[in-house]
Image (tube, rainbow, N blue to C red):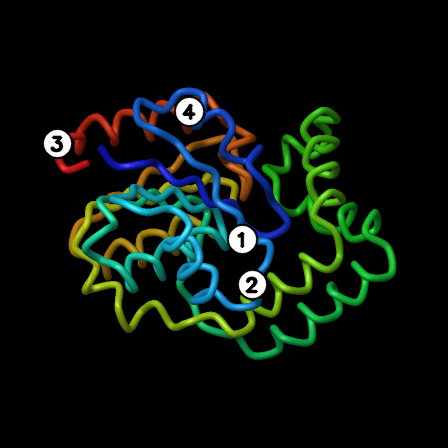
Amino acid sequence: MATLLLIPGLLSDARVWRAVAEASPMPVADADVSQETSIPAMAARLLRDHPGPLVLAGHSMGGRVAMEMAHQAPDRIRGMILANTGHGSLKAGEEPKRMAKVALGHEDMDRLAAEWIPPMLDPARVGDAALVTDLTEMVLKMGAEVHERQIRALLARPDVKTYLADIPCPVLLITGAQDGWSPAKQHREIAALLPRAEVQVIDGAGHFLPVERPEETVTAITAWLKTHEEEF
């Protein structure tokens, strides 16, 4: 049986996928994407560190890492779950904005967290003190140096549109209906480029879908895993 490898995104750790890990019907491993400064290097190290067949669950930046892993080792990747992710290349004006955030992080991580987290959530959840506190603790734990490494990796991200059509495994794309950073339209565009993909949109969630709506996320993922279990 394949291992479900849970890949977090920018400034994130295993808590993003905690509910899925606890409910998983298959063996689970947590991925570390905090050390490398490129998406391909993150993917290559995860493939080295986690041998055997894999089903990948990638959140946000972690989805880009998952797609790169499927590009590097298509024979080992049995399936992918891509949550709140993207496929676009570098946008005009993106680099200075990203690097300004990097500078802010080195100056004051509390301020960075306070600016970064609220727009990532469903507006209705911004006042959820427990959720915001948990995410803030996660961001502060990751720290400024990890933030800079991951931002540099995102700025140099591969153009996944050049290889998505060659990824043969089944793919589930999920996002929150209130995700303004990685909207449903973007996930449908990714699905259109993949040979075997479906999209699910969960209401009442923004960019941190797996922690904003953990029960609904678990339901969607476990049902999808059940559908494709013979391939895993």
Residue that label 2 marks: 36
At 45% from the left edge and 32% from the top edge, which residue is drawn?
203
Residue that label 3 marks: 230
- Return the disc, 3 or 4, that comes first in the chain's sequence: 4
What element does badge 3 sit on?
Answer: helix
- Return the disc, 2 or 4, that comes first in the chain's sequence: 2
Residue 33 image point, x, y percent: 53, 53
Looking at the image, is 153 positioned above or below residue 142? below
Question: Which numbered marker is on residue 33?
Answer: 1
Query: For the residues carrying marks 2 and 4, which lies nearer the camera in this image?
Result: 2
- Confirm or deny contact between disc 3 and disc 4 (CB under 8 A): no
- Confirm or deny contact between disc 3 and disc 1 (CB under 8 A): no
* Mark pair 2, 1: CA separation: 7 Å
Residue 137 image point, x, y percent: 74, 36
- Return the disc, 4 or 1, that comes first in the chain's sequence: 1
Going by the picture, which residue comes out furthest to the left?
230
Name the residue nearer the viewer: 130 or 7.
7
Quarter of the image for residue 151 reads: bottom right
- Return the disc, 3 or 1, that comes first in the chain's sequence: 1
Question: Disc 2 marks which amino acid?
Answer: Glu
* Mark pair 2, 4: CA separation: 32 Å
Question: Which numbered marker is on residue 51?
Answer: none
Specify whether 114 is left or right of 196: right
Name the residue nearer the viewer: 21 or 155.
21
Residue 104 image point, x, y percent: 81, 62
* Mark pair 3, 4: CA separation: 23 Å
What element does badge 2 sit on?
Answer: loop
What element does badge 4 sit on?
Answer: helix
Residue that label 4 marks: 216
- Confirm or deny contact between disc 2 and disc 1 (CB under 8 A): yes
* Mark pair 3, 1: CA separation: 29 Å
